Amino acid sequence: MEKKTIWIFVITIVVVFAFVFVQQLITSSNEQSADTTAEAVQETVVEEVIETQKLSSIYHPVSYSETRETFTVETDYVSVDFDTKGASVSSIKMKNYNDANGDLADVVFKGENDNNAFLLYWGNDIEDPVLDNFSYTVNETQDGISVVFTKNYTKDNGEAFTLTKTFLFKDGEYLFQLTVDVNGAELKESEYAFTIGYEPQVGPAFNVLKNNNYDYRRFYAGLIKSNGKVSRSTVKLSKNTFYSTQDFKWFSVTSKYFTVIGSPVNQEADYLYQATQGSGDISQTNGFFISVPSDETEASSFYYYCGPQLKTYLGSYYSGTDNAWGIRGLNLDDAMESGSMLGWLENILKALLQLLYKIIPNYGVGIILVTLILKIVLWPLTKKSMASTAKMQALTPQLNEIKTKYADNPQKQNMEIQALYKENGVSTLGGCLPMLIQFPILIAFYGLLNKHFELRGAMFIPGWITDLSVPETIATLGFSIPFIGNEIHLLPIIYTVSMIFSMKFTQASNANSAGPNKSTTWLMTWGMPIMFFFVLYSAPSGLLLYWTVQNALSILQQVYTNSKVFKDGLQKESAKPKKESKAVLKYQEKLKALEAANKNNKKGKK
């Protein structure tokens, strides 16, 4: 393979990896900058720190007689654990989804010392939550199941009021309503009456987010633009904090598969939105807060969606007939992880994968079959590429002969090589074009397998690949290996071996190649697979399965093409001594003419 072609291949690989991982880095962490392509990003960041006022010393509970209790309320979708301390939620388990241990997946994930969800703060100071014990009642009516917490308070001036927090749940919904009502007094002591916070991490449980490309926790905000449309933006934190008084449709903290979204029912109010990323029992602790202005006279209600990141549920709030709440125009699917520019291709591949799953209910088998189908569909494109590669390999002896013969004349050497390629129908760029055409499919499949919800917990091979959405582990060491960690994954090793063999078969220059191509060939055959091994070591099993099968099928295709080319006698023909090609002869005649002209010029000067 010529150096020019190899460089095109290398640059293409680099561009693809840059595209995939830069796309991840754009929104990979809340500590990094927001997505600069979103119109709302710069508008949503408030530079000055909004003044807060501690009001916990002004509002006093009437009594501390209530004892702390915990209790559970269930619908057909969720099991919610409540705590009378702070009238809060400690757990929201989803009945239809399990975690890695086989237990019900919990949207609310927190450490022992972290706060519960949906605590209330006086004003907009999020340092001191209301942790008094509330009295409560649980009521089941035709509207759903309501949990009503109440607590009596007095101000320093003796004015009394009752604080009521009401949670309302419905069957068939991951969305519930939280209403906060203050009866008997107006909370005018600061600009904001109170704040509701979601502080825990989004589940399911984890110890450490090992690779932010494949697992993450991110903040998103849906800004209501002047034309009424919602623009989703990645939230930028400044010193681990975010403040904004812009008009939002919703605010969310999202994991790879689950999300918590908060949306005020009354969009007209001038709410303050805050987000934090701070220290806690769990790494990368996140929380977002919504502060209600003190001039609000009515009870304040919020919708909270705590559940899977699936369009089936999130997309049901366009029309009032598609959800139990009768909600219209909430458009929570805007909060979903958006796909790449190849989202349309991801959807096609997803539909094909789901169709195969209906026939054979195993997503691992489905990934293999999709890979096989793609190889068959793309065979007309890859056939010419592989045939060209095989021909170049068959011509290696003659190429080496030309390089030796014209070692001192690179220009003539190149002319002879190009003439040899032309006579044998070999195109140096023909091998790269089909490869470039296949890269969009590769990128789309990467995006699909990295976040396809149905792969979560999907088993391929019992006892080995039990979850296609995470790396498989065959052993856990008592120590850590640099760049790898303490978990040993077998699939990355198999993938790397398959890539090395694939590179060997698709390299046009073999071990007998002379000149600088040897070092480049080594880089392609060994360097690239080793680099990919470390980059993809923590990749989901489904993604590595696809690339391993792809490499295996590429090897089979190249072996078949090589055997066909050799069978057609190209190697035998190329081994015969050939006369100088017409192009070379023409070039030699041109050189002789130039030399003669130079001699005549010299004689004329004398």
Image: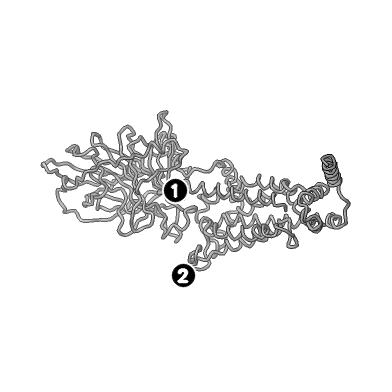
Q: Secondary structure at mark 2?
A: strand
Q: How crowded is the residue under tag 2: few (<14 C-alpha within 10 Å), some, or many (20+)? A: few
**Picture coordinates of residue 172, whole percent (x, y):** 41, 44
Q: Earlier in the sequence, mark 1 or mark 2?
A: 1
Q: Nearer the viewer, residue 385 or 150?
A: 385
Q: Is residue 70 left or right of residue 496?
A: left
Q: How is the image coloured?
A: one colour
**Picture coordinates of residue 568, whole percent (x, y):** 84, 54
The residue most toward the left is 158
Three-letter code for the amino acid on which mark 2 is drawn: Phe
Q: Is residue 8 left or right of residue 131?
A: right
Three-letter code for the amino acid on which mark 1 is drawn: Pro
Q: Which mark is in front, 1 or 2?
A: 2
Q: Say which residue appears at 65% left-offset and 54% top-offset.
A: 550
Q: CA–CA distance between discs 1 and 2? A: 35 Å
The residue most toward the top is 227
Asked whether the viewer can see residue 480, the reply is yes
Q: Is residue 575 left or right of residue 92?
A: right
**Picture coordinates of residue 402, whole percent (x, y):** 81, 55
Quarter occupied by residue 324? top left
Q: Which residue is mark 2?
A: 479
**Picture coordinates of residue 296, whole percent (x, y):** 25, 34
Quarter occupied by residue 280? bottom left
Q: Secondary structure at mark 1?
A: strand
The residue most toward the front is 606
Q: How crowded is the residue under tag 1: few (<14 C-alpha within 10 Å), some, or many (20+)? A: many
Q: Which mark is residue 488?
A: none
Asked whether the viewer can see residue 142, the reply is no
Q: Is residue 429 left or right of residue 80?
A: right
Relative to 506, residue 177 above or below: above
Relative to 127, residue 233 above or below: above
Q: Which mark is residue 308?
A: 1
